[in-house]
Amino acid sequence: MNLSTWLMTALGLLLGVGLGILAHWSWSRRRVERKLRLPARWLLNARGLMTSEEQEVWKWLRTAFADHAVMIKVPVMRFTIPSTKNRPENKDQHWHELLEGVYCSFTVCTLDGKVVGCVDVPGKRGLTRAQKDMKESLLLECGIGYTTVRSSSLPAGGAMRAAFLGEVPMSEAEAEETRGGDSSFHAALDEFTSEKVRAAKAAALKELKDKQAADTDPREKSRPVGFNPDGTGSFTTSDKPGRFATAWEDSFTMPADGPRAR
């Protein structure tokens, strides 16, 4: 083989590789465009936001918190923000991946939009202890109460208000008000009230948690976790790979637990 033959062979190979790369790029681009192209028909139907059990709990919450708004299935990312947002080490994408798709059945907030508590209504799949503990620790870090409620065993409305608002029985507050009226007393009263609020919230949340633990279906504790065909699944962190490996149910995509709410 002479030099010209080698050169022609090399040029042919380079040309073939170049055409192959161009063809692959063109195919990949068309594939992406097809994915992003809006469909001619949206093969979707409207559905209710709540199952029948969720609707029962929602009505009860609206009565218990008549002076608040009870929002339905608001993503946790909508009312939380990284505490290190203005620091260089903060990774917004990390928090987005970690919390994307995490929400509670109901979010109770004041009329000016401040969240005071979140409620989950376990569906047919239930909620594992890992799921409950993760949401509880996450929301507690933000000063927000969390509990689970079933329509078949609703707690007293006063217990829920104590858990989320820290409401102190009037008899205790009135007893303190009779002690005096100077500025030091008012400062002590404010401190007493704040402490009573914190204690009332902690005690009420513990009582609700204990009650729900007693009512929990044993099958919920042994339910396997992992990715599901309906789009729910688990997520992990690189530094603690097993910490958040929990299946998060998404009742936007999972089948309804009962008849759709009308």
Image (spheres, rainbow, N blue to C red):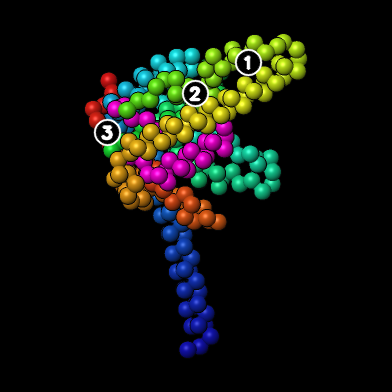
Say which residue appears at 48% left-offset and 28% top-offset: 204
Cα–Cα span, label 1 and label 2:
19 Å
Cα–Cα span, label 1 and label 3:
48 Å
Instruction: Answer with mark 1 or mark 3, whichever residue precedes in sequence.
Output: 1
Report the amino acid beneath label 1. Answer: Glu
Say which residue appears at 48% left-offset and 65% top-offset: 18
Q: Give the quadrant of residue 192.
A: top right
Counting from the top left corner in percent of width and height, residue 139 is at 52, 36
Along the line of sight, the residue nearer the viewer: 196 or 171: 171
Counting from the top left corner in percent of width and height, residue 203 is at 50, 31
In this figure, which residue is indicated by the disc labeled 1? 176
In this figure, which residue is indicated by the disc labeled 3? 257
In this figure, which residue is indicated by the disc labeled 2? 162
Q: Give the quadrant of residue 132.
A: top left
The answer to whether 260 appears left or right of 245 in the picture is left
Of tags 3 and 2, which is closer to the observer?
A: 2
Instruction: Answer with mark 3 or mark 2, whichever residue precedes in sequence.
Output: 2
Q: Is residue 104 visible?
A: no
Does the magenta run of residues contain 128?
A: yes
Please tell me the numbered disc located at residue 191: none
The image shows residue 239, relative to residue 12, as above or below, that is: above
What residue range appears in magenta?
Answer: 125-152
Counting from the top left corner in percent of width and height, residue 33 is at 42, 45
Say which residue appears at 57% left-offset and 32% top-offset: 143
Q: Give the quadrant of residue 122.
A: top left
